[in-house]
Amino acid sequence: MLHRNYIGGEWVEGVATNLNINPSNLDDVVGEYASADASQTEAAIAAAHAAFPTWAASSPEVRSDILDRVGTELLARKDELGRLLSLEEGKTLPEGIGEVVRAGRVFKFFAGEALRLTGDRLASVRAGVDVEIVREPEGVVGLITPWNFPIAIPAWKIAPALAYGNTVVFKPADLVPGSAWALSEIITRAGVPVGVFNLVMGPGSQVGNAIVRSPLVRALSFTGSVPVGRRLAGDLVARGAKIQLEMGGKNPLIVLDDADLKVAVECAVNGAFFSTGQRCTASSRLIVQEGIHDRFVAALKERMAGLKVDDALKPGTDIGPVVSRSQLEQDIGYVDIGRKEGAKVVIGGEALDRGTPGHYMAPALLTETSNDMRVNREEIFGPVATVIRVRDYEEAVSIANDTEFGLSSGICTTSLKYAGDFKKRSSAGMVMVNLPTAGVDYHTPFGGRKGSSYGPREQGAYAREFYTAVKIAYTLG
C-alpha cells in the first residue's frame, strides 16, 4: 500500500516514493510513502489559504469537537500506533505507546483551549471610548517536525494551530513518515473541512523550502537542527512572517555531594540514555562534585552495564537502536573524538550485533572531560554522556551555564538552599530538581533560551502566543 499525501481534501500520489525502514531490523520495510515536490507543496499551501477565512470564522465548539475526536482515537489506538512508532523510530515499545498517549492528551487539552481563548476590555484614557483586545488566528501555518518524536511533536504543533483557527501545511521528517501519516489520517476523518489540514511528505529541499518561501505562509513552527533553524529564521524574518524554533541542547545535570546517589544515577540513566539519547532535552553533560564523583561513576557504570540494548519491540528492552546509519556513525564518531581529546571511555561506545541488521550501540560514558572539549560543546544526539568533575556548587553552576544552548538543566541535591538557588541561576528555559532533564508535562510551556529556542513557547496555554495575533479595537460609544 502506498501512503499518499493529503492535499486540498484529497489523497494524492507524490512524484517519488520513500521506503520507511525499521532501524531494529533493516530487512523490515514498515511501509511505502509518497514524496512530494515543490509544486505539490504550493498546491497544499493554496488550499490552506483558500480554506482559512471560513475556518477562522468557525465556532470554537466545532474546532473543539474535532480535536477531541482526534484525541479520543489516538488514546483508543495507543497500542497499535505505539508499535508503529517504535518500528520506524526505534524507541522501546513502552516509550512508543507513551508517546501516543501524550499526543492524545495534547489534542484533548487543546480541544479545551479552543473554548478558552480570552481577550481583554480596558477603560480608555479618553472619555466615552471602549478598548477591546482580542486574539485572532495568523493564517496558513507551516509545521516542520523532526524524527525523534514522530507523533508527539506533530501533535503539539497541529493541535494548537487548528484550535486557534489557523490552517495547516504539515511536513514530517523523511525518516519517520508512518506516525505522521497515521495521525494525519485520523485528523482527516475527524471532520476537518477541505483545505484546513494538509500533509505533504518529502525532502526539505523541495517541501520545506516551498513552505518557507511562500508568501501565503504567515507562520512557521520548526523543530530540528541549529544550522537549519537559523537559516529559516533569516528567511522568515526577511519577509515579515512569524517563526518559532526549537533546536538543540547540551543539557547539564549537576550532582552535588549531598545528593541521594540512587536518585542521581536514575536521573542520569533516564535523561542521558532512554529513547536512545535522541532527545533535545537529554542529559549530555553530567557535572559531578568531587566528593561523590567516584561513587557516582561506579554506580552509574554498574547501572549501565545492566541495560538491555535490543530490538525496540522485544519485552525487556531498555534501549532500542539508533534511528539511522548516519546517526549511529555520528554517535560513535563523537566517542572517538572524546577519546582523542583525552576523555576516558568507562563503558560502551561501540556498535552492537543483535542478530538482525540494525543500528545498535552500547550507551557510552566518558569521564575525565573538561567543558571545553568538543564532546561537551556540540550536541551529539545519541546515547553518549560525559562526566565533568567540579570542586563545589559555584563551579558546577558556572560550567552548567557555559554553553551556547539553554533548553533544559537539572540538579540532584537534598539541599533546599542549592535547589532554590539553581532554579534562579540556571540559564536554561526548563529546570529539573531531582528529576531527569528529559520529561515534561503536556499542559505546561516547553522551550529554552540562547541557541536552543527562538520565538514564543510551545505547548500549554502559552502556545496561543505563537498561533494567534493580537488585535486592539477602539470604539467611541
Image (cartoon, helix red, strand yellow):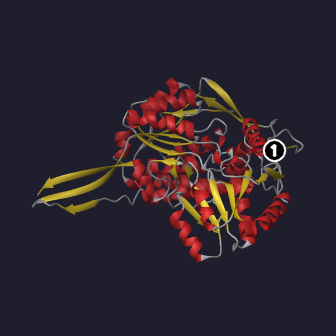
Q: Residue furthest right?
A: 355
Residue at image coords 74%, 60%: 269
- Residue 339 in the image: above or below residue 308: above
Q: Quadrant of residue 422?
A: bottom right
Q: Quadrant of residue 78?
A: bottom right
Q: Provide the residue designation for mark 1.
A: 360
Q: Residue furthest front?
A: 391
Residue at image coords 60%, 42%: 146
How far across and how far down the image is residue 118, in percent? 34, 60
Q: Is residue 190 visible?
A: no
Q: Is residue 116 left or right of residue 20?
A: left
Residue at image coords 85%, 60%: 306
How far across and how far down the image is residue 168, in percent? 46, 40
Q: Is residue 9 left or right of residue 323?
A: left
The amino acid type of the residue labelled 1 equals Tyr
Q: Quadrant of residue 29?
A: top right
Q: Is residue 328 visible?
A: yes
How far across and how far down the image is residue 106, in percent? 54, 56
